[in-house]
Image (spheres, rainbow, N blue to C red):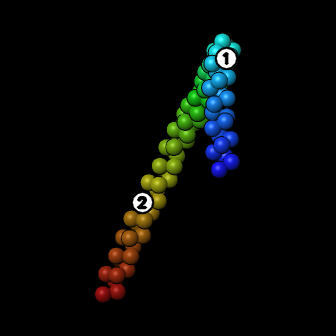
């Protein structure tokens, strides 16, 4: 119950604060937007660079998978040959 009351008081005070200090709010918003764009752009560039590195290393993993598949097929053929020799 105390959290509800505190939340409502904070909401009302916040609305009153924005009304009285609207100019300061806009200045803070104008100052924060370029900073958010810079940080967001840097994060996007970093993630894009990491994705390129991952794509560069990805074919090696697929080559190993193909090798494993061929080994499995060879083993299956050997098992079939052993079964036919037993009979």
Residue 9 seen in the current view: yes
Mark 1 touching mark 2, by CB under 8 A? Answer: no
Indicate the position of residue 13 as horizontal and vertical percent values: 67, 29
Instruction: Tell me how far mark 1 sits from mark 2, CA to CA.
Output: 74 Å
Q: Residue at x 66, y 43 (%)?
A: 5
The residue that mark 2 highlights is: 70
Q: Is residue 13 left or right of 70 when viewed as pictured?
A: right
Q: Viewer-proximal residue, 50 or 20?
A: 20
Q: Nearer the viewer, residue 43 or 56?
A: 43
State whether residue 38 appears in this view: no
Please tell me whether mark 1 or mark 2 is closer to you in this view. Answer: 1
Please tell me which residue is depicted at 44% across the width and 54% down the height of the picture. 66
Query: Circle 1 is placed at which residue position?
Result: 20
Vertical position of residue 6 compared to residue 19: above or below: below
Task: Check disc 2 and report its element: helix, strand or loop.
Answer: helix
Q: Vertically, is 77 above or below 5?
A: below
Classify residue 52 by image quadrant.
top right
Residues packed near mark 1 inside 10 Å, few (<14), some (14 to 19) or many (20 plus) = few
Pick the residue in front: 72 or 14: 14
User: Residue 55 shows which numbered tag?
Assistant: none
- Taking the image as shown, residue 29 lies to the left or right of residue 54, namely right
Q: Which residue is drawn at the image coordinates 66% and 12% (left, top)? A: 23
Callout count: 2
- SS of the residue under disc 1: helix
């Amino acid at each position: 119950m105390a959290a509800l009351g505190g939340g409502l008081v904070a909401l009302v005070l916040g609305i009153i604060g924005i009304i009285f200090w609207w100019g300061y709010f806009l200045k803070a918003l104008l100052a924060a937007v370029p900073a958010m764009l810079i940080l967001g752009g840097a994060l996007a560039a970093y993630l894009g660079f990491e994705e390129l590195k991952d794509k560069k290393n990805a074919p090696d993993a697929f080559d190993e998978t193909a090798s494993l598949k061929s080994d499995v097929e060879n083993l299956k053929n050997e098992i079939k040959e052993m079964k036919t020799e037993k009979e």
